[in-house]
Image (cartoon, grey):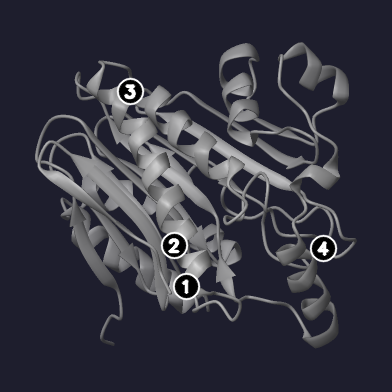
């Protein structure tokens, strides 16, 4: 079977590199020239914020968080403000942060944390656990996280998509999960992913984004990966970890590993994409969906692509 994966190399062979994504899927029915221009601008702002830290000598984790903060605050993307709405009409968000030394934190079912990636960081650095589902208000306060009422996250565009999905069936239109992978001046790598899930999903549904090894993974011996798409298929393929295993144990290139993994995602009736950055070598953007929003930058230059 021939593969339908689109690939684009990203970053330098060595040195600092940042790659970001903001969703993959079909072309949006609601896209306008203005919304595409805003998406392009917000991707560029996120890329600039993270890369500026790398240039200053900051670590890969800090660069990933800085880039994700910008995208979580931008209502164009399905994470933080602008998150998709569940079947009962609320924003329910997940996130994961992992560094190449194997340390990881993740959260699922957030409804008030302004920047879900900060909650993932708190789990990683302030608890002895890996994954929290629906952390309590007291836990969120103890972690020092900024909160907002759930209405803050809900945009008119998401209300419209939610109503359409409830009227016409689930909206798999365009998966706007966001993520970033970075390599710092020391060669350390990190990955982060943040999402609002899928429009009209059942309350309590958890996709691949907060699951280490499924939607997010980092191993200093191999690669950092952040995925976006139909989460159920990425979970079944254990997609992010599969890329790492293919590189580590099969000796595949990052390109071959990404293609093979996305082909398996497709075999599970899913589509989407991923960004992959090795500890040494060029990274890539890969997707088997119609479109993908992404950007990358290194000492060799970079670019931003906002899908129509």
- Whether residue 282 is visible, yes or no, is no
Q: Which mark is residue 266?
A: none
Could you tell me how far apart the alpha carbons at marks 3 and 2 are, in whole angstroms?
25 Å
Q: Which mark is residue 33?
A: 1
- Residue 91 location in percent, x, y? 78, 51
Q: Which mark is residue 53?
A: 3
Q: Are marks 3 and 2 in contact (CB under 8 Å)?
A: no
Q: Are marks 1 and 3 in contact (CB under 8 Å)?
A: no
Q: Image quarter for residue 13?
A: top left
First in sequence: mark 3 vs mark 2: 2
Q: Are marks 2 and 1 in contact (CB under 8 Å)?
A: yes
Tell me if residue 88 comes above or below residue 182 in the rendering: below
- Residue 106 location in percent, x, y? 61, 34
Query: Closer to the camera: disc 4 or disc 1?
Result: 1
Query: Closer to the camera: disc 3 or disc 2?
Result: 2
Residue carrying label 4: 202
Left or right: residue 148 versus residue 1 is right
Could you tell me how far apart the alpha carbons at marks 1 and 3 are, in whole angstroms?
31 Å
- The answer to which of 58 and 243 lies nearer the viewer is 58
Residue carrying label 2: 37
- Residue 184 location in percent, x, y? 25, 25
Left or right: residue 193 versus residue 118 is left
Name the element at disc 2.
Answer: helix
- Residue 71 location in percent, x, y? 52, 44
Tell me if residue 11 comes above or below residue 16 in the rendering: below
| Circle 3 Cα neighbour tier, 10 Å, few/some/many (<14 / 14–19 / ≥20) | some
Q: Residue at x 40, y 25 (%)?
A: 61
Which residue reaches farthest front?
34
């Amino acid at each position: 079977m021939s593969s339908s994966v689109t690939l684009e190399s990203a970053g330098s062979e060595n040195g600092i590199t940042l790659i970001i994504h903001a969703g993959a899927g079909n072309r949006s029915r609601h896209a306008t020239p203005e919304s595409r221009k805003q998406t392009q601008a917000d991707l560029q702002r996120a890329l600039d914020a993270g890369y500026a830290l790398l240039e200053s000598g900051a670590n890969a984790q800090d660069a990933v968080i800085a880039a994700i903060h910008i995208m979580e605050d931008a209502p164009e993307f399905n994470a933080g403000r602008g998150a998709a709405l569940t079947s009962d009409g609320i924003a329910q968000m997940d996130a994961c942060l992992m560094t190449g030394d194997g340390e990881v934190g993740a959260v699922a079912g957030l409804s008030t944390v302004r920047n879900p990636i900060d909650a993932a960081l708190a789990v990683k650095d302030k608890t002895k656990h890996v994954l929290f589902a629906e952390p309590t208000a007291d836990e969120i306060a103890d972690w020092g996280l900024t909160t907002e009422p759930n209405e803050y996250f809900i945009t008119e565009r998401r209300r419209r998509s939610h109503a359409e999905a409830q009227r016409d069936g689930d909206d798999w239109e365009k998966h706007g999960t966001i993520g970033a992978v970075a390599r710092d001046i020391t060669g350390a790598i990190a990955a982060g992913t943040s999402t609002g899930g899928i429009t009209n999903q059942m309350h309590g549904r958890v996709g691949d984004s907060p699951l280490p090894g499924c939607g997010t993974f980092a191993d200093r011996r191999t690669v950092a990966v952040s995925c976006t798409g139909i989460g159920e298929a990425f979970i079944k393929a254990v997609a992010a970890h599969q890329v790492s295993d293919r590189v580590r144990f099969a000796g595949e290139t990052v390109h071959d590993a990404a293609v093979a993994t996305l082909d398996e995602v497709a075999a599970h009736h899913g589509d989407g994409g991923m960004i992959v950055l090795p500890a040494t070598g060029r990274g890539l953007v890969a997707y088997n969906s119609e479109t993908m929003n992404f950007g990358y930058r290194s000492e060799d230059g970079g670019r931003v692509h906002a899908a129509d």
